[in-house]
Amino acid sequence: MIRKQPAVYILASKRNGTLYTGVTGDLLARVWQHKNDAIEGFTAKYSVHRLVYFEQHENMPSAIEREKQIKKWKRKWKQELIEEQNPAWKDLYENVI
């Protein structure tokens, strides 16, 4: 189980589907919220529930900076980032609980 630590994450609706990039201090809790549509918004509206990428950071300012960087990227770059670590676009949530 991953301890509470700042993290940047990318969710996908499916392989090469709709992407969502976020930042959190508790990855497990936040992804659970997305998966269960506990919070109204983009991920609930477009069924973006699959955790396909995450990276942990030492502190929240560095995680926020990285999130902003990734959000500015072209879609192709985000796909390449995901596929470097998760070529099958598997849901990583079960691996981190």
Image (cartoon, rainbow, N blue to C red):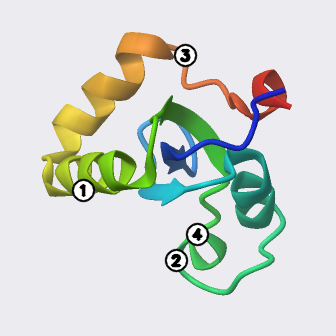
- Looking at the image, residue 31 sits to the left or right of residue 76; the answer is right
Q: Amino acid at mark 3?
A: Ala
Q: Nearer the viewer, mark 3 or mark 1?
A: 1
Q: Residue at x 57, y 42 (%)?
A: 14
* Distance (Cα) linking label 2 and label 4: 4 Å
Q: Earlier in the sequence, mark 3 or mark 1?
A: 1
User: Which quadrant is home to the C terminus?
Assistant: top right
State the SS at label 1. Answer: helix
* Distance (Cα) linking label 4 and label 3: 21 Å
Q: Amino acid at mark 2?
A: Phe
Query: Looking at the picture, does residue 41 appear above or below residue 96?
Result: below
Q: Amino acid at mark 4?
A: Thr
- Looking at the image, residue 64 sits to the left or right of residue 42; the answer is left
* Distance (Cα) linking label 2 and label 1: 14 Å
Residue that carries the numbered disc 4 in the rendered image? 43
Q: Earlier in the sequence, mark 4 or mark 3?
A: 4
Query: Looking at the picture, does residue 46 appear above or below residue 61?
Result: below
* Distance (Cα) linking label 3 and label 2: 24 Å
- The residue lying toward the viewer, choosing from 73 and 47, is 73
Residue that carries the numbered disc 3 in the rendered image? 88
Task: Estimate how packed mark 3 is, as few (under 14), some (14 to 19) or many (20 or more) residues with alpha carbons within 10 Å.
Answer: few
Query: Looking at the picture, does residue 86 appear above or below residue 69?
Result: above
